[in-house]
Image: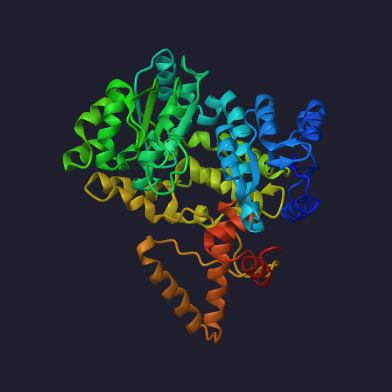
Amino acid sequence: MKPIWIVDDDQSIRFVLEKALMRENLPTRSFTHPREVLQALNNITPEDSPLVLVSDIRMPGGSGLDLLAQVKERMPGLPVIIMTAYSDLDSAVSAFQGGAFEYLPKPFDLTKAIELIRRALEESQREAVGAVDADNTPEMLGQAPAMQDVFRAIGRLSQSNVTVMITGESGSGKELVARALHKHSQRAAGPFVAINTAAIPKDLLESELFGHERGAFTGAQTMRRGRFEQADGGTLFLDEIGDMKFDLQTRLLRVLSDGNFYRVGGHSAIKTNVRVIAATHQNLEQRVAEGSFREDLFHRLNVIRLRLPPLRERREDIPVLTRHFLQQSAQQLGVEAKRISDSAIALLQDFAFPGNVRQLENICHWLTVMAPAQAIEPKDLPPEVLSPSTSYAAVSAIAAGSLNGASHEATAAVPVGPPTALNGHGQSGMPKPLVLNMPSEDWQSGLETQAMALLVDGRTDVWDELTKRFEATLIQTALAHTRGRRIDAANKLGIGRNTITRKIQELGLDD
């Protein structure tokens, strides 16, 4: 794995970060002043290039801001974290303006520092993977007949700046299609900026989209450019547009109408040249009829509609996607890619994938971390893949029910996150997972059933047994979600790093 570069004239800072990153299995390379970094950049090979640069802002050998500017000229995609004392916050503003990923105030909390470096590392890897994916977009999307209309549409739209609306179930790959539309358009040299409008709180979304002026609201210490400005000359992808609040829809409509907008707290109109691609899993016609989505905005966005089929409608793509995701996951984790048997592939092809391509990708990450051998067999697959309740026939029945008036959200009743592939205590001694293959609102009934089974069996350790299963399932699912990173998993679960380490040892999860 490529190293993280640390630049600081303070030996104690370098030592602390080196040791903490070493515990996370992250290689480092340290420098005492900027001149050493620039010399190293002149002589590195692609394998030795940094994934993240962490630099102090004031050093005897030069300024961290000057170093930032020179590094950004050579490696514009490299995330740079600037370390600064609290008295240097004005300099931190300059760091942001110079393209820094984030600043780290001194003295810093070590756990938060590692978390920040992890975020920068993910950004760096996402950039690298994105470059690979951009060269292989058709292969990534698949070659099934259900995708041919999508390919043809991308081709037809390649020379157009028309607004596109992508519809499809959650996890079906709508952003990949948006990136393909951008890549093959006349705006390919410009930026591609994506924002999930449903993932950002209403109070922050306006600032995210349009930016804000200094002092516009509490905490707005500097001017910030919004996504419309960042995407100028390129493409702005608005994901889950159907969940946007009604008052923000009005502001969005104005931008789409004349290309002008105001930053929050601003008084001068800003002109932007952006192609908008929107996506949603919602039925926008229904939301318009309900009065929760503006009809004029709907017609403004719905110039060209592109439907992306769910994964269950293109099962023949599952083998190539599975092998691609296994290769990708191994590359990200710095391990050897695992192979998957034809029999395991056949089971995946019979799985409903309510979470679509994203769920398949998550399962492949989980298999890379949790499968015990290099060759993945059917027994290594997560329990929900082996459950008949998640077969294509079952989901087809659910879909048929939704057509007859049942809620489309019924598909969410199928569990998505793979907790574990082990049954019983096995050779590893791990607790049997708490597998509740039923609607999420009725999981308590599943717990009651398992508790009753143990009680009928005469067990007197039911509390301890089910608690162990519950904790093991939560931890393994969180580790799968964070691709094996314990600190991130602990943060997601709301527990401490020492707690998750102790629990992993007590439950035998690292055997």
> Is 267 left or right of 91, judged from the image as shown?
left
Q: Is residue 27 visible?
A: yes
Tell me if residue 229 comes above or below residue 445 in the rendering: above
The residue most toward the front is 87
- Residue at the spot 26% in from the left edge and 25% down from the top edge: 300
Residue 293 percent location from the top left of the image: 23, 38
**Residue placed most toward the observer, 68 or 136:** 68
> Is 461 left or right of 245, judged from the image as shown?
right
**Residue placed most toward the observer, 363 or 167:** 167
Q: Quadrant of residue 313?
A: top left
Residue 475 percent location from the top left of the image: 58, 63
**Residue placed most toward the observer, 276 or 106:** 106
- Residue at the spot 68% in from the left edge and 42% down from the top edge: 330
The residue most toward the top is 159
Tell me if residue 402 comes above or below residue 41 in the rendering: below
Residue 111 percent location from the top left of the image: 64, 58
> Is 251 left or right of 416, judged from the image as shown?
left
Q: Is residue 420 visible?
A: no
Residue 296 percent location from the top left of the image: 20, 29
**Residue placed most toward the observer, 68 or 183:** 68
Q: Quadrant of the C terminus?
A: bottom right
Q: Quadrant of the N terminus?
A: top right
